[in-house]
Structure formats: structure tokens, C-alpha cells
């Protein structure tokens, strides 16, 4: 079943990597030496369990960009309200429009990029140990998917999994920054898996039609279509931007997925409070947090509500993110070196590992 699901996403998903399941730079450097290593990433509210185990080599070979958890990253903004984000300093691109405290609508143009900045915390496992890994993250996503973008991940100091200590293996990547090319989408892939603005702005503004779109997304065949639709909703908002009509339609569609609950005043990693769509599965409640006025995506929260593996006390936070800024810029940064190429469109695999 898992092999079939991997193939589904390998054949259909675009290159832009999802937040969860970040393959570490150390694994890239020691590809053969780490052949037996296993990574863990939570499938918050997903259809196949509270967490899914995939060998990192298998994931890298297929360049899977599945709708697992997400994690967003990069500089957490002010604790009191939505962060104001300007264009990155000392870089050649120019900030055309920035989504500041009141979330003004963006109108990106062909040839430009949307710069997403965020911060993330998720679980990770290796060498028989488990911990909470944290990153800062920037993604330059092209407005049109036919252009390549860039992903920057800064690995931060890890935190202990509830009831445990931080293992030494978790500290090896701290303060490392990695860069990855990201392809807009793969030739021949279904258009509905695209996540660039040029495509997302054409999605239906009707909640019913948007709901049908969520259920059409490629997924496993274990019968839990509702869980996969919720995962698709998550992926639709993470490091992507849509006009308000589409955002509102997606939010309203998400409310109708069986098992989804609505909660007020849920905090993201930046301390901002919003309205959340949540779904509980296998002892873990996944909440997608939105600004209640604009339906802008703020972040995610994963809270233990029952039995999880490894055990963690009820109420523990295993995932917490914040998307702190979305900015329109004219170009990719020119001062980045050692960019890992994106091989996700190569049927034979490639050198890029799915990160973020």
C-alpha cells in the first residue's frame, strides 16, 4: 500500500516540496553512509496514521511532495499581531508589494516571484531517537510554474520530544543553511497539482467546486478520502498564494470535510491568533490557522489528544508553524551558492532531496 502511494505522488506531484519530512543536508553529504537511516515525519490528521515512516532514500528517489504535514519557516514576526515583512536586505531583488500587518491583496505579475517566509517545528527520528526539529525557511516560488524557484532552509537548535531529551544526532545540523532549486511543475503532470499563482488564481471561487477540487487531488487508495482532502487543503495554503475569492472558497470547502471542526483564537508559532480548521486522527489534532478577516494562512498546530507513538502527554504540541510573510519580488537572490539541483522531474530520480 505504501509503495503504491509513493508511486501516486511520485508520478503526479510538482517539485515544490512540502514542509514536513525535511531530508537533512547531512544525509545528502553522506548519501551512501546513511543508507540505513530512517526519517520520521508526522502526517497530522492524515489518512494512514499519526505518523508515516519512509526511508529517506526512497523518498529522495521519487522526489515525493506529498501532502503530509507542513512546516513553514523563517523569522518569526511580532508576537502581538501579523508580522510586517519587507524584502530581504542586501539582495538584488526589489520588493514590489509586501503583505504587512493588514494583509493587503497581492497582484504578482508574470516573471516575478512570491517570497514566503516562515518558521516551523515538527518531529523527526533517526538512529532510534526522536526529537522536535526546527527550521527557518524561505521559498521563492515563481508566479508561473514554468520557472524554477529557490528554497532556503536554516536548521535551528532542536527541542526535546515530550518526556525525552535531545539526542546528539539531532544537533548535527544546527546552524546549517541549505539551498535547493525548486521546479515550478513537471511536464506531463496533472495541472491540478500545480501550486503557482498563475494556476491557483484560476481555481473556482465557489466552495462546492473547490471542495470537488480538493477531493480530486492524487492520494492513496486506502479509502480515507476525507483525510486526504484535508491534507490537500493544507497543501493548497502552505507556501502558496491565492486571491481572496479562492482563499475564502477553500476555507469554506474545508469546513465541510467530515471530521473537521472550527476553533477560534488558536495561536500560531508567532503568537498570532486566528480561526482554525482542525481534524483529529490517531491521537493527533491538526489545526490550520487563518486570519478570520482575510483568510490568509497563518500557520499550523499539531496537538496530542490521545495515544500517539512514541507516547506523549495529552496536550503536548508536536507541530507548530507560522507563515510570517509573503512578498512579491522581481528576481531570485544572486548571492546564493551550492544550490542543490531539483531532480524531481527526472523519472530516474535526481540529486535533490525533498526538504521542508
Image (cartoon, helix red, strand yellow):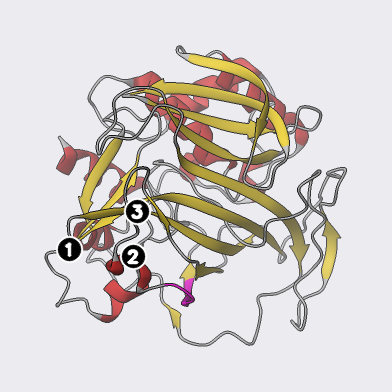
Residue 37 is marked as 1
- Per the image, the residue denoted by label 3 is 131
Of circles 3 and 1, the one toward us is: 3
Q: x, y percentage for residue 299?
A: 61, 41
Query: Please, what secondary structure does the residue beneath circle 1 have?
Result: loop
Q: Earlier in the sequence, mark 2 or mark 3?
A: 3
Which circle's residue, 3 or 1, is located before the other in the chain? 1
Q: Which residues are magenta?
A: 174-180
Instruction: Assign the C terminus to one quadrant of the image.
Output: bottom left
Q: Earlier in the sequence, mark 1 or mark 2?
A: 1
10 Å neighbourhood of mark 2: few (<14), some, or many (≥20)? many
Q: Which residue is mark 2?
A: 170
* Callout 2 touching callout 3 (CB < 8 Å): yes
Q: Foreground residue, 37 or 62?
A: 37
Q: Quadrant of residue 313?
A: top left
Residue 87, label in figure: none
Placement of 45 over or under 253, stated as above or below: below
Amino acid at each position: 500500500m505504501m509503495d503504491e502511494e509513493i508511486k501516486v505522488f511520485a508520478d503526479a506531484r510538482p517539485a515544490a516540496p512540502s514542509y514536513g519530512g525535511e531530508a537533512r543536508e547531512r544525509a545528502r553529504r553522506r548519501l551512501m553512509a546513511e543508507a540505513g537511516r530512517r526519517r520520521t515525519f508526522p502526517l497530522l490528521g492524515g489518512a494512514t496514521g499519526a505518523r508515516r515512516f519512509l526511508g529517506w532514500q526512497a523518498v529522495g528517489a521519487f522526489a515525493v511532495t506529498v501532502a503530509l504535514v507542513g512546516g513553514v519557516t523563517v523569522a518569526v514576526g511580532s508576537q502581538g499581531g501579523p508580522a510586517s515583512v519587507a524584502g530581504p536586505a542586501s539582495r538584488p531583488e526589489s520588493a514590489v508589494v509586501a503583505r504587512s500587518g493588514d494583509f493587503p491583496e497581492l497582484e504578482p505579475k508574470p516573471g516575478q516571484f512570491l517570497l514566503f517566509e516562515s518558521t516551523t517545528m515538527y518531529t523527526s527520528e533517526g538512529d532510534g531517537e526522536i526529537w522536535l526539529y526546527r527550521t527557518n525557511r524561505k521559498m521563492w516560488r515563481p508566479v508561473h510554474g514554468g520557472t524554477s524557484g529557490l528554497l532556503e532552509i536554516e536548521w535551528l537548535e532542536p527541542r526535546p520530544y515530550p518526556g525525552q531529551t535531545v539526542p546528539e544526532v539531532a544537533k548535527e545540523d544546527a546552524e546549517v543553511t541549505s539551498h535547493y532549486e525548486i521546479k515550478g511543475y513537471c511536464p506531463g503532470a496533472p495541472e491540478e497539482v500545480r501550486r503557482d499563482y498563475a494556476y491557483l488564481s484560476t481555481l473556482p471561487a465557489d466552495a462546492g467546486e473547490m471542495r470537488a477540487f480538493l477531493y480530486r487531488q492524487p492520494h492513496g487508495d486506502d479509502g480515507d478520502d476525507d483525510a486526504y482532502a484535508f491534507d490537500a487543503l493544507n497543501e493548497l495554503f502552505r507556501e502558496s498564494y491565492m486571491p481572496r475569492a479562492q482563499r475564502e472558497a477553500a476555507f469554506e470547502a474545508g469546513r465541510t470535510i467530515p471530521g473537521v471542526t472550527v476553533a477560534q483564537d488558536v495561536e500560531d508559532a508567532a503568537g498570532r491568533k486566528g480561526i482554525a480548521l482542525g481534524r483529529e486522527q490517531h491521537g493527533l489534532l491538526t489545526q490550520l490557522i487563518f486570519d478570520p478577516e482575510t483568510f490568509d494562512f497563518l500557520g499550523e498546530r499539531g496537538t496530542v489528544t490521545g495515544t500517539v507513538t512514541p507516547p506523549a502527554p495529552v496536550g503536548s504540541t508536536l507541530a507548530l508553524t507560522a507563515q510570517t510573510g509573503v512578498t512579491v519580488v522581481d528576481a531570485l537572490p544572486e548571492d546564493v551558492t551550492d544550490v542543490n539541483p531539483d531532480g524531481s522531474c527526472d523519472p530516474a530520480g535526481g540529486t535533490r532531496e525533498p526538504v521542508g
